Image (tube, helix red, strand yellow):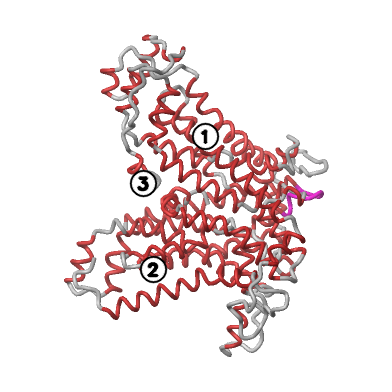
Amino acid sequence: MNIRAQRPGRIVLRYLLLLAVLAISIGPFLWQLSTSLKGVGEDIYSYPPQFVPSEPTARNYARVADVVPVWGFALNSLLVAVANVAANCVGAALAGYALARMRFFGRKFVVLAFVLALLVPGESIMISLFLMMRSMQLSNTLLAVVLPGAVSALNVLLMRNAFAGLSYAVEEASLIDGANAWQRFTRIALPSVKGTIAVVAIFSFMFSWDDFLWPLIVLHDPDKYTLTIGLNYLQGTFASDQRLIAAGTIIAVAPLILMFLALQKYFFRGVGAGAVKG
Amino acid sequence: MVTDDNAADRLPGRREPNSHCVRSSQDAPVPSSAATDLRAAGRGARRSGRGIRRHWRATPWLFLLPGLAITLLFSLYPFVNTIILAFTDAQVLGGGNFTGGANFSRMLHDPQFWTALRNSALYVVGVVPFLVLLPLLLAMLVQRHIPGIAFFRAAFYTPVVASVVVVGLIWTWLLDSRGLVNSVLKALHVVSEPVPFLTDETLLLISAMLVTIWKGLGYYMIVYLAALANVPRDLHEAAEVDGAGPVRRFFSVTVPAIRPTMVLVGALSAVAAFRVFSEIYILSGSSGGPAGADISLVMLIRQVGTGLNGELGYSSALSVVLFVLTLGLMLLTMRLNKNEEVA
């Protein structure tokens, strides 16, 4: 990028800055991990602070499960997230395809409905949603956690853009060969937008796994808790033992970090798209 | 940005046009109504696809059904319902009479509302400048392809992936009166007594803002990286030949080129900051600070509207205010952008 070559001093400075930011962004996670591995006998408030546990132990992970059903929470989170991913991928792809490739009366109104839905902040309808769930006898169920975000308007518009960006030539050829709309959709259009579907899937999973406010409102029974509200509950019950809270947070965050490391490029690609979702 | 990923997806379908596929009633050629479809279709289609019916009349609606049903039922209907409820005295137990603007005039005299509004507004003011500027500097730091840069980018993005609850609990522990931050500060003799990050009314709000900024850095860094890639290199080179130093080049080349992105980041972070809930909720141990002094607007909506004594009407009125102010904030940012472009 520069005309002249990088001077060694500059590159060293750059790496020093990178390491400083690294300490700030990763340090807190490592400190939490370290705390979660410290045994009951080890002073977690020791002064000066002890970064590496003297006798690392996994016992806190077993103990946290004695205090709250943390694996049950994890299972609930997983169920909700998987349902959310499936519904978003299927629903958004179908609707997006219709909006991008089909001509019908009322199409503009449908697009408008999705755009309006995008503008309504979830926080401003949560009370009304809660009322609905109650009258549908769904409050305190995992289904109620999934439903409001099951097909997000943003994902529909994202899929519409992806389909609209495809060349129409092949679909047209198959149309002439007698393929119906469903066949054109599943055999030709869908395989070409795999990348966008991956982005939709990953961001749906992440938003669902990390969601806090809505499950906090709609779930009352600890058996139904997802990990995020389960952790909040854990903090309320055993605030005294930081080791257990640390173990709980690591259980909640580890799957997502591993998923992120494996699928980095999709996470980065989805940033612009997910930006609007907030 | 939304359409960025189309490029990679624009692969030609490899499958042969199916000659073996089962014909269903949907492809029965019906020239009369097919004409309407074809009129709207591309020029090529009109030439070659004459007389072939593209789809059955109900097909688009079948495709739209799941997505549209969810959106109408769980976004737009509750939205309309919220507006209606805002003009009633509905409660979890009973109520439901139309009361006109009573909820809104009650707000004017509700000190909790003003506290919440002030905190949410302060949150925007405290968070947005940092989330516009710091991620940009960070993006410039990781922009160059030097060895190991992919690792640093991934590491800086990690806080984005974690749930706010996890992040909030991590920072609750770090900022505890006996936590890491206070021990380090004491070890460096910066302070003699632990700083009450989580128990002081003002410090709690600032701590929550720090958590929001920390968690948002990586996200907006990626947004900026995409924008920086589009800044013409020759502009930088020309400026450098003219003797402009890095600071000068930042302000006269980089900033003008990515201004739209900065406005976008400003709008997104402002709207998100105004809707803050989890950071304050978790850091305060779900109390909203000493005597609820750090409560945000969303926290107030939840507090008023839930539980057995939930005042749905009043809570809905607060929700309407939240919606209007969020929308206003968005429009304001866009307006700012437009004005400055004209100037």
In what element is the residue under mark 2? Answer: helix
> Is residue B115 among the parts visible in the rendering?
no
Q: Is residue B310 magenta?
A: yes
The label number, if any, that marks residue B4 in the structure image: 3
Q: With B319 as the anchor, is B287 left or right in this view?
A: right
Q: Which residues are magenta?
A: B303-311
- Which residue occupies 44% across, 41% down? A158
From what the image shows, is residue A157 above or below residue B104?
Answer: above
Q: Position of residue A49 (x, y in %)?
A: 61, 82
Q: Mark 3 falls within which chain? A: B
- Which residue occupies 63% across, 42% down? A146
Q: Position of residue B213 (x, y in %)?
A: 52, 66
Q: Mark 1 falls within which chain? A: A
The label number, if any, that marks residue A90 in the structure image: 1
Label 1, label 3: how far apart the Cα atoms are: 21 Å
Between discs 2 and 3, the one toward the N terminus = 3
Q: Nearer the viewer, mark 1 or mark 3?
A: 1
Label 2, label 3: how far apart the Cα atoms are: 23 Å
Q: Mark 2 falls within which chain? A: B
The answer to which of A105 and A96 lies nearer the viewer is A96
Q: Nearer the viewer, mark 1 or mark 2?
A: 1
Q: Position of residue A219 (x, y in %)?
A: 73, 48
Do the residues at pointers 1 and 3 share their chain? no
Do the residues at pointers 2 and 3 share their chain? yes
Disc 3 residue type? Asp
The label number, if any, that marks residue B137 in the structure image: 2
How packed mark 3 is, by other alpha carbons closer than 10 Å (few <14, some 14-19, many 20 or more), is: some
